[in-house]
Image: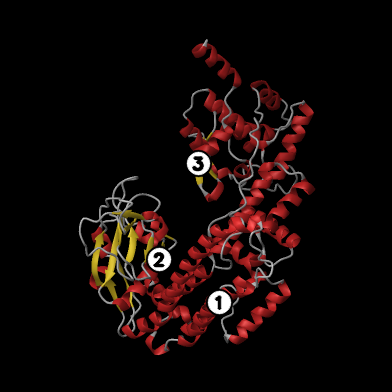
Amino acid sequence: MLNDYLLELLKASAKNFYADYERNEDLELPEGWRWVEIDEIAEMVCRGITPKYNPDSDETVLGQTCVRNNLVLLENGRLHMPKKVTEKWLQKYDLLINSTGVGSLGRTAQVWFEPSKLVVDSHVTIVRCENAKHALYLGFWAFEHEKYIESLHTGSTGQTELPRDHVKAIRFVLPSEEELEKFNAIAVPAVELIVANQRESKRLAELRDALLPKLMSGEIDVSKVDLTQLNNHFLLQSSKLEFKCIIQYPFSKQTLPNRSMLQPCDLGEKMNETLANQIANKMSIYLNSVQMKALQNVLAETFKLTSSNAIHDDRNILDLFLQAKKVEGCSPQTIKYYQSVIQKISDQIQKPFPQITTEDLRNYLDSYQERKSPSRVTLDNIRRIMSTFFSWLEDEEYIVKSPVRRIKRVKTISVIKETFTDEQIEIIRDGCPTLRDRAIIELLSSTGIRIGELVRLNKTDINFLERECIVLGKGNKERRAYFDAKTKIYLERYLKSRNDNNPALFVGFNTSHKRLTIGAIEDRLRSIGKRLGVNKVYPHKFRRTLATNAIDRGMPIEQVQKLLGHSRIDTTMHYALVNESNVKASHRRYLT
């Protein structure tokens, strides 16, 4: 956790240099700053060696699995027998970039220790800076741009690689020597502490493995050991480093003109704000809401924060999340559903969002299941909303890690849902008491559109000549839906019978002639089915019936997908139930 904190702190420090200028390259750079390509500052950009593995050697070769989470994992390396001494032996502050394959391409790490007889294989690119002052800044820039680096690959899927020339041409903002010295004054001791933590963790893991059998057997008694004294030197070093971060910043405003992102506060306050939020997030799991509020006040006073969002108030988090979903294009119904579910979770757990744990969410799902007896699909929908919300909190840096990551998907039972038979469809058609009801039944039967799409239809959306209509589906995506001649006839009859000016395709019978709602149509169909003795008549059943009949009659699944407006074909397969009589006929034809 400490290493994660230090990495995020340094990434934020480096990002303050380049973020504004990458968003707007027209901004004027401060004096001494410049746009550069890696080739301009690099002493060497090359791939690693082709190894010859040998367990009796003392030279280690690192592969792509050794570059993880921006750290070099020596434990994943392998021994190999070198053919000759090479300039490709790694040096301190070399930047490593995974350069082949899918999934790991673009991952970066940096050598923060003095390596001895250490190389990388040909799947990894080495970037060595000519001036050591540039190295750490370049490393932390690369950590934040892994997706961009990955996008520079060539080749097809499964055979992708990152050419050396593409790496050399990577362009970024390089601050002045003075500002780099200030950054390095923070970064150098921080990365040394990260390396020390890695070594200590490895040593403690080895010690654990050696002592665990003796502890379990009772050979060693640790009841009198003061565990609070362990690793105090690391806590002390991290505290000193945090204090050093505070006193080294702020940078002078004169060297940072046109930094709109930092108004009205300067870079020093931005750094303090980052540090305050990190401390608040880390302490949130140990404090209740009253104590957390007191801590936030102390941090704001200590760091003299003037920014209104310096330490985020939980009361605004849900509103900000819903606002983000609205910007992403979610429908009002989806946003309302998000709000309802998340608010209920918050009301029951009674904790600020950053303090909610995996156990809290599991307990909520368990109690919800006992109280409501929901279907597994409903329970998994709640879990998915939890995952979406807490992943957003993680992305926005309100929390370090989403507590939903350890909650697995709820397994659902595959149930064969009913469709209408041909006889039932005819009974419903003949039993419609009004022209409007018959037109609705015909449109649902022949198009398979969703009920939400049907109620949004206007008269102008219908093209009677081509027998098609334009519907607005999920995600605000428009598509064409097609209807048959019978549907055209009943729609025309129904529209001719109306004497109102409402643009809606289907309206109520009262004098106001308002657009029909989803609930009104569902109630109407339910009452028609009940009167006619047809079980479970509801709008979506017509859609499922259409999909199943289309598949049974040989319509390609891709066309059914297009017809129903699904973005993923596996969604279509849920609707497309294979007729049991067809399975029986195929069995007799092919297997008997």
Residue located beneath label 3 in the image: 568
Residue located beneath label 1 in the image: 235
Residue 317's place in the image compared with 213, above or below, is below
CA gap, disc 1 to disc 2? Answer: 25 Å
Q: Position of residue 517 (x, y in %)?
A: 69, 46
Q: Is residue 67 left or right of residue 529?
A: left
Q: Which mark is residue 288?
A: none
Q: Which mark is residue 143?
A: 2
Q: Quadrant of the N terminus?
A: bottom right
Residue, far top: 592
- Residue nearer the viewer, 523 or 130: 130
Q: Secondary structure at mark 1?
A: helix
Q: Is residue 39 left or right of residue 543?
A: left
Residue, far left: 84
The mark lying in front, picked from 1 and 3, is: 1
Q: Position of residue 109 (x, y in %)?
A: 38, 64
Q: Position of residue 498 (x, y in %)?
A: 66, 40
Residue 507 in view of the camera = no
